[in-house]
DNA sequence: CGGCATCCGTTCCGATACTG
DNA sequence: CAGTATCGGAACGGATGCCG
């Protein structure tokens, strides 16, 4: 594991280190999604955070944006191959959490 | 992928979502380490963050602390089996980063 | 050696209001 | 529908000084 310095960890966290990026990627896994769809399925997200998250993921080349000049306007977000590969890489972590969160629950105190 | 709500992602990020936790775990992978050793190898970490990180990882059951009543005092931190398993789960993400960071570099602008 | 407590600037992020 | 702009509280995190 090449972790002589914090560069790798830093890069992971800069990319998916927020509360929402991984969730957004996960919801795009089933195919293109519209802004409103994401807003509804990501319960509790603010418009601000959804927009910010989509922009950053776009800048990092993990998702792509397609807007259609219709009435009403329509915009679709999709995973890029790069984003799909990241999602696959993160799958191990998601699996770990679903396997072990009860162990953490036992150890952790409520006030966090 | 069970991501109906943000609980899973939230839990990952509560646990390893900081700049240092994953690095600390990685450095404990080679065996027990002392406080001072960690402080030196984690370039740039403040005492405050090292202490905080160690406490949280301990509370989550990912590392264990052993203190020896010697002179001078000695304290050793080690990975628990749970911590080791998390590290293994995160390995996929680390590998992904080392494979693809150049693609992100190309897309990302400097000012972030 | 191995910490903890305090201060304090920076960043994050939700709420709200408004726009193409 | 799909955003942008702005504000203000909360959390993060570094620096410093003190303690067992």
Image (cartoon, coloured by chain):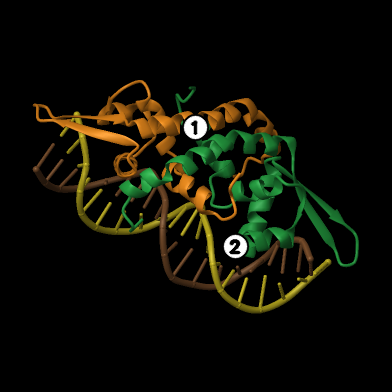
Chain colours: A orange, B green, C brown, D yellow
Q: Which residue is mark 1?
A: A89
Q: Nearer the viewer, residue A29 or B11?
A: A29
- Identity of the residue drawn at 48% across and 22% down: B1
- Residue B86 lies, in percent from the top left, at 63, 36
Within 10 angstroms of label 1, few (less than 14), some, or many (20 or more) residues? many
Q: Is residue B111 above or below residue B108?
A: below
| Residue under pointer 2 | B43
Per the rendering, the mark at residue B22 is: none
Residue A11 appears in the picture as rendered: yes
Q: Cβ–Cβ below 8 Å for labels 2 and 1? A: no
Marks 2 and 1 on same chain:
no
Q: Where C2 sits versus A56, above or below? A: below
Q: Quadrant of residue A99?
A: top right
Above or below, B47 against A111 in this view is below
Q: Nearer the viewer, residue A5 or B62?
A: A5
Residue B58 % position (x, y): 71, 46
Name the subunit of mark 2.
Answer: B
């Amino acid at each position: 594991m090449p972790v002589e310095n914090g560069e790798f960890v830093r890069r992971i966290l800069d990319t998916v280190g927020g509360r929402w990026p991984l969730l957004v990627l996960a919801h795009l896994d089933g195919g293109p999604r519209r802004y409103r769809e994401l807003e509804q399925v990501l319960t509790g997200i603010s418009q601000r955070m959804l927009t910010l998250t989509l922009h950053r993921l776009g800048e990092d080349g993990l998702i792509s944006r397609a807007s259609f000049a219709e009435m009403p306007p329509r915009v679709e977000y999709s995973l890029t191959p790069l984003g799909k590969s990241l999602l696959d890489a993160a799958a191990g972590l998601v699996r770990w959490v679903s396997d072990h969160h009860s162990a953490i629950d036992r150890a952790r105190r409520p006030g966090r």
